[in-house]
Structure formats: structure tokens, C-alpha cells
Image (tube, rainbow, N blue to C red):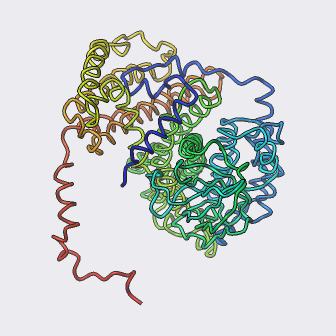
């Protein structure tokens, strides 16, 4: 794993502060504050918006049932043009584009629910749409486009002009500050040269959002016509999963782009890219929600009908544990995605941390749900849907969903990069007050000033971590309903644990100071604990909202209670591993491995990549 460099981190910070948003729920959580007022109670949408949303989602579900052939997408490794045309005719390409430009203007909540519907049928198709609506040209223009650019491109995007986001390069993945693609000024435009890897929609896109470096000015973002001279899709990438996503390598050779197609100013490319990725990460877990709910459907049907030892297999404790995990996790992940989307639509708070947490949870949990489903189905879980159908059984693509969802741990930023980004959020407050203390480039004067500021901050902050609402039995009374599981107890635990996490983070910074950033496993565990607390809060809020609406309230409370029980056990394990682990020994061993100390252990194996 490579860590984003200083320039990339500064660009990420600029993306957060550009709109001067208030700290979000997750920012407070990492500081030991459970700000339930930021997430509960949730406002209801106005009736007209609700009707438009429900009508669109109903049309989309009907289209997916009758007009999408997921087996063909998997078999042919491409989405048929008629399927894309059908989605465009429904308005799916313009879900979040303002009606002024021909879109539906329905926001993140509707977009995420739509992606969940599509993801339950074909994760690859959902990935295609995700790349367009969430990280493609429409989102970039929403972030930094001019009125003229929006008028020129958004109607095309809404009507069906597929777009793609070109950022990753052979030597610039997790560290986009190393971009090698150039945009050289030339008269009234620019000439672009470079190679971009792993571009979803590369083969079918009409419009490309390209981030390239302007010599002497820094990265900039451009809208490029895919049919422009010098643009070439050199190959279609053969991935483990998401075979119909049309992912490929794009080469730019002397591509001329008018200056009017530059989005934002020269030097703003990384800020725009990070802003696009922040909202784009909200869509990946939405896809995961749909696929995870599909896993729950199949697990319920299979474990409730398959018989072993005279009983349906769900009566066996080992099977029941897997089914319970899938059900509780599907509920919690749905809650996380719904809450984060609503917060994004409100636009009150900075959501960089929430979107990264949703992406982290979505990728990790959805893949595990699919893995548990494959295990539940045994040999049938490993068998392809085509093979099952050929011998007369129901063609359930469990192994395909496992492959497709494995990509969610990598696409849009790997789990490790989410840990890096979120660990910055976890220690951000400390870096703000004590940054010059641990900055080797800071002068003695700056260090003295930082020392005084840090003293004032910690004098107020540390005592606040000693006690809080988590010790009061009457706290969070909205979540304690007679005859229901007591979710208030879980929120009291969450509040206490958030303060415990903040103390642990402070201890880590005090212990390692400038070396804390290199303690990646420690910081990853801090982030994972924060993710458990975030999902627990979201699950409780979601359950209470469903209860207050009269929508399966008791069942929702039961599912939230199950999730919270699982999360509490995992969290205790993570806390112990903060200080009791094999990290140092593992690092030493890994260095010895790469120093060829154990090559004898590899014998007598052969390397299949070098055999004929």
C-alpha cells in the first residue's frame, strides 16, 4: 500500500474546506462525541418528492425485472446497448441532474436506492451507472462547472451520453499527486498525453472526465469527447468480477481540448477529483446494499428449505449464525447508506468521513455476506449459475456475486486507502492543534505557539472524555420502547466507546508523535472501531425511524439489536489489538521475506506466469 503524499493530502483537505461545511457526525465521533442531534430525528421528504421518487423506483424495478438479462451481461462481459438505452429513457442517467438540464433532480437518496435495485440484479450494470452519475462528468460539473459547461454537457448526460472518470495511472493510484498525464497549453486549448488505467465505461463512454497536470500550474480537470482524435481504448480489462463494467485502459495521444472544456482553474484538478470521489464513494455501498439484500433473500430461502439430519439447516447453530450475520449486516448497511445519503442531500456538514466509512463498510461487509452465502450453499455456492441451470437446478449466481463484490473492496479506493483517509480524520483535531509540534519543518517559534495552543485544547478536551451521557441510564429515551429490544443501551455503550476511542487515539499520538502516521495497523484499528460505532448509530436511528412510521418497527429493532451485539464483540477485539498485536514482528518478517531470506520455502513450486 502506498500512502497519499503531502500534495494529495493538502488537496483532500482543500476539497473539504472549500465549502466551509461544519464537522459531520463522524468527525465528532472520532473526538469522543456522540452527536445524535446531527442524525436523529430524521426529517421526512416532502410528499411531492416522495411520490416522484417512488414512481421512478417502481418503473426502474419493473425495467430490471423484465428487460435486464444479468446472465447475458456476465456471459458476454458487456452491457447491451438496448439496456443502457432503456435506463436512459427511464431517466436513470439524469437521476441527480437538475430538471433545468433534462434530469430528474432526485438527489442521493433516490440515486442510492436505484443503485441498490440494479445491484441486486447485476452489480456490473450498477457499476456502469455508478461511474456515470457519481464520478463522471455530471458530478464534476456540479462541483466546479460553469453555467456554459453545464448547459453544453448536462443535457447530453441526462439523455444517455455515458461518461467516465479518468484518474488512475500506471504509477499514480493511491497517490494521485504523481500524475504523469500532461495537459500542455497550446493556443486557445490544451494538448493531452498520457495513459489512464481501470476506467469503468471506457469502451462505451461518450464523455471523459480527465485529470492531467498542466506544467508549472499543477493538475487540472477536463471534459474530453471520447471520439476525439488521439483517444484510444487499448484494451478491455479482464477482472475477477464486474465483467460487464466495460473497464479498460485509455491512451491519450496529442488530444486537443478547448480551454472552455477545462473544469475549474489550473491547479484545481486534485481538489475537484477528491470532491468527485467523496460523493462517488456514496454510490459504491449503495450497490453493495442491493447485492447484500439479495444474499439475504437466497440465504433465507436456502436455509429454511434445505434439510440435513432431519431438520431444516437453519436449526443448526453454525448455519443460524451465518444467516443471522447476513440479516443483521444487511440491515445495518442499509441504514448506513440511507443515513449518509440523507446527510449528503441536506448539505449541512462535511461528509468526507461519512462517505469513506460507508465505502469501507460497504465493501468489507457485502463481500463477507456473499462469502457466507457461498459457504451456506456448499458445492452449489461454488457452481456457476450457467452450470446449475444446465443440469436443471435454479441458476443462483452466488459465486458471481462473491466475485463482483470482491471488487467493492478495491474500486473507488481500496480498504487500505479508506483506512489512511479516515485515520487522517481520526487524528485531524490533534494535527490542527499540535501540527507544528510534530512537523520537522516548523520553526522553534511555530513550535512554541503550537505548544501553547495544544495545552489550551487538551485542558478542555481531555476532561470531557471522562464522563458523558453513556453513564446515564435515562439517556437516549427515544430508543427505549416497552416491549422492544433496548437500543438505548447500545447508544449508551456507543457514547462511552467513542470517548474510549478518543482516549486511545490521544495515547497513540502521545506515544509515537511523528511516528504515528507510520503505525498504519494501529490507525486502521482506530478507524475500524469508528466504523462499528458509526454503523451502530445508523442502525439504531434507522430502526427507530421505521418504528415511528409504523414500518416493521419490532422487526427493525430486533435486527438493530442483533447488529449491535455483533459490533460490540468485534469492537472489544479491536481495542485489545490496539496494544497487544504482532505488528512489529510482522513488519520484521515481511522485510526478511523481501530480502530473499526464505526463498527456499517456495520450492518446488513453479510460476505459472512464466510457463508456456
Q: Residue furthest front?
A: 187
Q: Quadrant of residue 28?
A: top left
Viewport quadrant of the C terminus:
bottom left
* Residue found 52% across the figure and 57% down from its top: 168
Q: Quadrant of residue 438?
A: top left
Could you say which is closer to the camera, residue 313 or residue 41?
A: 41
Could you say which is closer to the camera, residue 20 or residue 305?
A: 20
Residue 593 percent location from the top left of the image: 20, 66
**Viewer can see residue 289:** no
Does residue 316 appear left or right of residue 243 in this picture?
A: left
Does residue 463 appear left or right of residue 185 in this picture?
A: left
Could you say which is closer to the camera, residue 517 or residue 528?
A: 517
Residue 328 percent location from the top left of the image: 48, 39
Work out whether 243 lies above or below 6. below
**Viewer can see residue 156:** yes
Viewport quadrant of the N terminus:
bottom left
Work out whether 398 lies above or below 515. below
Could you say which is closer to the camera, residue 454 or residue 317?
A: 454
Q: Quadrant of residue 599?
A: bottom left
Does residue 156 appear left or right of residue 134 in this picture?
A: right
Residue 10 percent location from the top left of the image: 45, 39
* Residue found 33% across the figure and 23% down from its top: 433
Does residue 421 appear left or right of residue 14 in this picture?
A: left
Residue 611 percent location from the top left of the image: 38, 87
Count of number-bearing discs:
0
Work out whether 381 lies above or below 16. below
Amino acid at each position: 500500500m502506498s500512502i497519499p503524499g503531502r500534495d494529495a493530502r493538502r488537496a483532500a483537505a482543500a476539497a473539504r474546506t472549500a465549502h466551509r461545511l461544519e464537522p459531520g457526525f463522524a468527525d465528532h465521533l472520532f473526538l469522543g462525541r456522540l452527536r445524535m442531534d446531527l442524525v436523529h430525528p430524521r426529517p421526512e421528504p416532502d410528499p411531492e418528492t416522495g411520490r416522484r421518487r417512488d414512481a421512478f423506483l417502481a418503473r426502474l424495478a419493473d425495467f430490471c425485472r423484465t428487460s435486464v438479462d444479468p446472465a447475458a451481461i456476465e456471459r458476454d462481459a458487456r452491457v447491451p446497448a438496448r439496456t443502457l438505452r432503456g435506463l436512459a429513457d427511464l431517466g436513470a442517467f439524469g437521476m441527480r441532474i437538475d430538471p433545468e438540464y433534462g434530469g430528474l433532480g432526485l438527489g442521493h437518496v433516490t440515486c442510492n436506492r436505484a443503485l441498490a435495485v440494479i445491484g441486486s440484479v447485476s452489480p456490473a450494470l450498477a457499476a456502469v451507472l455508478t461511474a456515470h452519475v457519481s464520478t463522471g462528468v455530471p458530478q464534476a460539473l456540479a462541483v466546479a462547472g460553469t453555467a456554459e459547461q453545464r448547459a453544453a454537457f448536462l443535457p447530453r448526460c441526462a439523455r444517455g451520453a455515458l461518461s467516465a472518470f479518468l484518474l488512475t495511472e500506471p504509477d499514480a493510484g493511491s497517490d494521485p499527486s504523481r500524475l504523469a498525464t500532461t495537459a500542455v497549453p497550446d493556443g486557445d486549448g490544451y494538448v493531452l498525453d498520457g495513459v489512464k488505467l481501470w476506467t469503468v465505461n471506457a469502451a462505451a463512454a461518450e464523455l471523459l472526465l480527465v485529470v492531467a497536470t498542466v506544467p508549472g500550474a499543477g493538475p487540472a480537470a477536463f471534459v474530453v469527447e471520447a471520439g476525439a482524435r488521439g483517444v484510444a481504448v487499448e484494451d478491455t480489462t479482464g477482472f475477477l468480477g464486474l465483467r460487464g463494467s466495460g473497464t479498460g485502459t485509455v491512451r491519450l495521444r496529442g488530444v486537443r481540448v478547448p480551454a472552455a472544456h477545462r473544469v475549474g482553474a489550473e491547479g484545481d484538478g486534485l481538489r475537484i477529483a477528491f470532491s468527485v470521489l467523496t460523493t462517488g464513494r456514496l454510490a459504491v455501498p449503495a450497490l453493495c446494499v442491493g447485492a447484500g439484500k439479495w444474499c439475504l433473500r437466497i440465504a433465507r430461502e436456502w436455509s429454511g428449505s434445505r434439510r440435513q439430519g432431519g431438520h431444516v439447516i437453519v436449526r443448526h447453530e453454525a448455519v443460524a449464525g451465518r444467516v443471522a450475520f447476513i440479516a443483521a449486516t444487511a440491515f445495518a448497511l442499509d441504514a448506513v447508506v440511507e443515513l449518509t445519503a440523507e446527510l449528503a442531500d441536506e448539505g449541512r456538514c462535511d461528509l468526507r468521513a461519512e462517505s469513506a466509512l460507508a465505502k469501507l463498510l460497504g465493501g468489507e461487509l457485502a463481500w463477507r455476506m456473499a462469502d457466507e452465502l457461498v459457504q451456506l450453499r456448499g458445492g452449489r455456492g461454488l457452481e456457476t449459475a450457467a452450470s446449475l441451470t444446465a443440469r436443471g437446478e435454479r441458476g443462483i449466481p452466488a459465486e458471481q456475486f462473491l466475485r463482483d463484490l470482491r471488487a467493492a473492496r478495491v474500486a473507488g479506493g481500496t480498504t487500505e486507502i479508506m483506512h489512511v483517509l479516515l485515520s487522517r480524520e481520526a487524528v485531524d483535531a490533534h494535527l490542527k492543534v499540535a501540527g507544528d509540534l510534530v512537523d520537522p519543518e516548523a520553526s522553534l517559534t511555530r513550535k512554541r505557539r503550537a505548544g501553547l495552543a495544544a495545552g489550551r485544547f487538551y485542558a478542555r478536551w481531555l476532561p470531557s472524555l471522562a464522563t458523558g451521557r453513556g453513564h446515564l441510564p435515562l439517556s437516549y429515551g427515544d430508543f427505549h420502547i416497552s416491549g422492544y429490544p433496548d437500543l438505548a443501551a447500545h447508544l449508551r455503550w456507543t457514547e462511552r466507546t467513542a470517548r474510549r476511542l478518543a482516549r486511545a487515539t490521544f495515547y497513540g499520538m502521545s506515544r509515537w508523535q511523528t511516528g504515528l502516521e507510520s503505525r498504519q495497523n494501529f490507525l486502521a484499528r482506530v478507524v475500524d472501531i469508528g466504523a462499528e460505532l458509526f454503523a451502530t448509530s445508523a442502525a439504531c436511528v434507522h430502526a427507530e425511524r421505521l418504528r415511528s412510521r409504523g414500518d416493521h418497527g419490532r422487526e427493525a429493532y430486533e435486527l438493530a439489536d442483533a447488529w449491535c451485539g455483533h459490533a460490540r464483540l468485534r469492537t472489544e477485539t479491536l481495542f485489545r489489538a490496539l496494544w497487544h498485536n504482532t505488528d512489529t514482528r510482522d513488519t520484521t518478517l515481511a522485510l526478511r521475506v523481501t530480502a530473499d531470506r526464505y526463498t527456499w520455502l517456495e520450492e518446488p513450486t513453479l510460476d505459472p506466469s512464466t510457463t508456456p
